[in-house]
Amino acid sequence: MSIQETWTTLKLLSWTKEYLLSKGVSNARLEAEWLLCAATDLDRVGLYLQYEKPLNETELSKYRSMVTRRARREPLQHILGTQEFYGLEFEVSRDVLIPRHDTESLVEEAMKRCSGANTILDIGTGSGCIAICLKKMLKNAEVTASDISEAALAVAKRNAARHEVEIEYVCGSLFAPVNCRKFDLIISNPPYIPTPDIETLEEEVRDFDPHSALDGGNDGLDIYRKLIPESIEYLNPKGWLMLEIGIGQGSDVVEIFGKTDCFMKFFTAMDPGGIERVVGAQRKEIQ
Ligand code: GLN
């Protein structure tokens, strides 16, 4: 991008598309449009209406710095500061996992199977997306959300304020911050990527999502081996435990549930891409 040229919207978009493609960004044209929208405060229709309009210096320098960041494979969501999930917009930063659309299946299953839950615990809430969506829909439920990271909780709290919901936030590992309490639904999208696979992930994920939100130990199942048996003490009789899982982890996770002998009504559910993404079961009434 040289200073002398007149950079119209149209010219910038085609230049950026080629540039980002050369840096390995696959959705380059659309992403260029989003970045340009952010730099100019226009929406996409606005951009199209002003194809021939040159950008002013302020817009151009804002755009240039955003494109540079994206070319280094920083996720678009970090540059724009938000990600949409379940129809709501969430603030995101390097302190939290960017919410994935696959995780919407977990929220859907919770709504389908236990919309009568009065007490809900979301473990590892990150941006807060799961807890906040559930609270939005189940207005009378008391929702508690935990995370091991104070920085993540700060983001989650801002997201709860943004969506005007009241959620109890607690800091700590797994059940430590809710000792002696019981819930009708415990839900979590825990870290489940096998450690050796992390370096093979695309740069946006590998270099920018918090590793504590991704790394599930050698086979990816470490957290399920702790969370599932420990959850029994924190579930009301007939309370549900619903968990997101990674590709191919369904039967192993169901086995971990089964070994406890404390669960019934097992189910698995797929994400929109047809991948088994959710495993859940109901705590038996009598042990
Ligand atoms: N609960 C958050 C989400 O689903 C964060 C999950 C995590 O950090 N592993 O996006």
Image: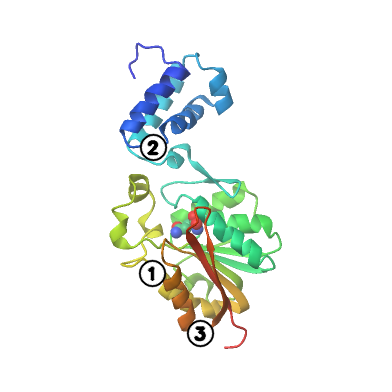
Neighbourhood count class around disc 1 (C-alpha, 10 Å): few under 14, some 14–19, many 20 upward? many
x, y (%) of residue 167? 61, 59
Looking at the rendered structure, the kind of residue marked 1 is Leu
Q: CA distance from mark 1 to mark 2?
A: 31 Å
Residue 81, above or below 224:
above
Residue 205, above or below 38:
below
x, y (%) of residue 2? 33, 16
Residue 54, above or below 79:
above
Q: CA distance from mark 3 to mark 1?
A: 19 Å
| Point 38% across, 26% down: residue | 16
Q: Secondary structure at mark 3?
A: loop
x, y (%) of residue 130? 56, 57
Tell whether label 3 touches label 2 (CB within 8 Å): no
Looking at the rendered structure, the kind of residue marked 3 is Asp
Residue beneath disc 2: 26
Q: CA distance from mark 2 to mark 3?
A: 46 Å
Question: Which label was assigned to residue 221?
Answer: 1
Quarter where residue 57 is shown: top left
